[in-house]
Amino acid sequence: MKDNTRRVVAFVAGRLISGSEAWSIYDCEASRTCRFSGTVSPEQILVYDPEARCRVSGYGEKDCYSLYHHGNRHHIELKIRGSSFEGYDYGSGAHFSGSVDGSSVVVFDGQDRRYYYFTI
């Protein structure tokens, strides 16, 4: 999964699960804060990533989200399961999963089989 896709997945999942109103996420791997703007709600996702200069948009129903990354031009499926999440990144052709505990977000990227850590 591309770095910018992973960050936005961590951000959206972190917002939806934690209920946080934050508009940034700290990427522990890159040691930096990434900012976003837009809307994150149980029904609609419309996030702008100024670093990638693109939107990620989609809709949700019953904790299942169909997202589209306009910069990378591919779909992302995201399912929320309590404090955990899982999904599929069509750009990399790989599954991902993760969990949220307070402000901590962990993403397991099935493409490179590694864990990535974020703080929202």
Image (cartoon, rainbow, N blue to C red):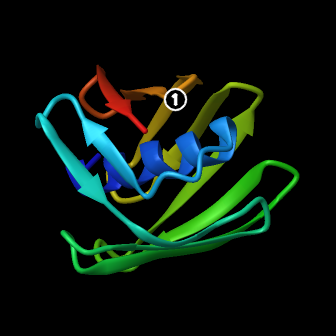
Q: What residue type is labelled 1?
A: Ser
Position of residue 33 in the picture relative to residue 119 (left or right): left
User: Could you say where residue 34 lies in the image, as x and y percent from the top left?
Assistant: 25, 54
Q: Residue visible at 39% across and 49% down? A: 93
Residue positioned most to the front: 21
Vertical placement of 55 versus 22: above or below?
A: below
Position of residue 85 in the picture relative to residue 110 (left or right): right
Q: Residue visible at 54% across and 40% down? A: 14
User: Could you say where residue 26 lies in the image, as x and y percent from the top left?
Assistant: 28, 39
Residue density around tag 1, few if under 14, some if 14–19, many if 20 or more, within 10 Å: many
User: Could you say where residue 119 lies in the image, as x and y percent from the top left?
Assistant: 37, 32
Residue positioned most to the right: 62
Q: Residue visible at 69% across and 58% down? A: 65
Q: Which of 2 and 102 is in front in this view?
A: 102
Q: Which of 31 and 10 is in front in this view?
A: 31
Q: Residue visible at 47% across and 34% down? A: 96
User: Could you say where residue 102 lies in the image, as x and y percent from the top left?
Assistant: 57, 23
Vertical placement of 37 versus 87: above or below?
A: below
- Quadrant where the C terminus is found in the figure: top left
Which residue corresponds to mark 1? 97
Question: Which quarter of the picture shows residue 73?
Answer: bottom left
Question: Which quarter of the picture shows residue 69?
Answer: bottom left
